[in-house]
Image (tube, rainbow, N blue to C red):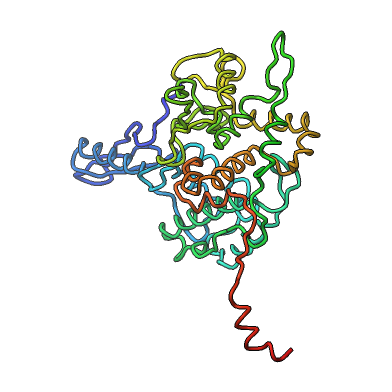
Amino acid sequence: MAPARIKPGNIGRIEWDYERHPGKVRGVARTRDAADKPRRVVAVRDTCEEVEAELRTKAASLLYLGDIWSPATTLEEAIERWIATLGDADEGNAQRPQSVETYARTARGVIVPRIGALRLGDIPTPQLRDFMKEMREAPHRTRRVKGAIGYSVSYRLHILRALRDSLGLAASMGAIPLNPARDLPRPSKNKAAETGPHSCAGGRVARLYASLGGQQKIGAAERPAVAPSDRARLATGCRIGEVGGFLMDETTDVPSLRLAVTGTIVTVAGKTFRANELKDDEQARILELPSWARAVVDECRSIATRSGPDAPLLQGLRGAKQSPAYIRARLASLKLEYREPLEVAGIDLDDFTFHTLRRTVLTVVDEAVGRIYSQAQAGHADARTTAGYISTPRALPIIVGAAGAIDTAFGHAS
């Protein structure tokens, strides 16, 4: 029968030696360190009890043996060690599980294949700047486009965070004197080159809703052809995960039709579930719904197959939650089915996503009642974030009063 496997921090059978050190006892034992690598510990003391105690102390100390950092450590190794700290509050890296997965996927999928083999001592700041510039034009695949050119600003922010934090960890461990990613510029949108976020604001909102409001025959009854999730987004302006996270019990009719936004649907390690928190505490909110949304809520209640405190408002088969992936697929099918009326309504189908509906609602609210309300509707902690969602025509200032002075001074020259 094979001997039991030694666990890290424990010791195996002690081999005693009473001759090598006269008047002393020498003991040797095997153990395993934190990386599960075999180790050998030795102790020389006056008694067997003292030897055994020292051997156990040395074995336990190997559990805290840190990784060896040096200029020869590769960037890939530094990134993996940084990923291991994600989600650990004691490491100053408290992250939600979905954020941990996002950063790990970004680092392993983008940074490691390109520059992961570089040694930490050979990474200068100019090379990292060139790498970040390359990310603005690098071809890649997205959910919507197979041959997209350039990573989005939000994606490049994730790349920058992974570089800064992993190299910062390496600097704190003494592998390099300074963090070469510390002064890399933060990616930002080129506002001067943009015409504004795409939305269906203005008169197109009514035409959009009319296009999505058709009826279809289902059994003996007629129901709207568009799924409740599509119209729920137009009624609230919520994020796609928040829409999937609406709960049946958090939708009330008193004193008016209201809906609480307290969680979001996330996917971690291939499993989809509802996280009972949002990005920030201040983003949890209760929204008053427009009068036409009552039909959407009533429809959701009538077709629901599951009830209870955790029952979703928008239910799939057998009462399951609707994942963001399912909702996106539903909208893609809708665009194909309603292509003609949507194009007649003036909707750019190439840039019409579920996020377009969020921008549309926030733009309508902002134009009607002001930024403070659109910010609250969006659940943004900062009004500057909301400003990036508002699609408004560029207003040029009209300068009057100067023409008279110019005419007086130079009119005689004509």
Residue 160: horizontal and vertical position, in percent? 55, 55
Is residue 200 shown left or right of residue 81? right
Circle count? 0
Q: Nearer the viewer, residue 36 or 187?
A: 187
Q: Nearer the viewer, residue 36 or 51?
A: 36
Image x and y of residue 268, in percent: 54, 33
Quarter residue 249 falls in: top left
Tell me where residue 275 appears, x and y as whole percent. 47, 31
Q: Is residue 268 visible?
A: no
Judge whether residue 403 can be spotted in this image.
yes
- In this rendering, would 224 be left or right of 98? right
Q: From the viewer's perspective, is residue 257 above or below residue 344?
A: above
**Quadrant position of the N terminus in the picture:** top left
- Identify the residue shown where x is 55% and y is 23%: 294
Q: Is 44 drawn above or below residue 211 in the view shown?
A: below
Give me the residue at 55% from left, 66% from top. Answer: 125
Name the residue furthest right.
Answer: 340
Residue drawn at 43 percent across, 23 percent down: 254
**Given the current orientation, which residue lies at the most extreme top position?**
220
**Image quarter of the C terminus:** bottom right
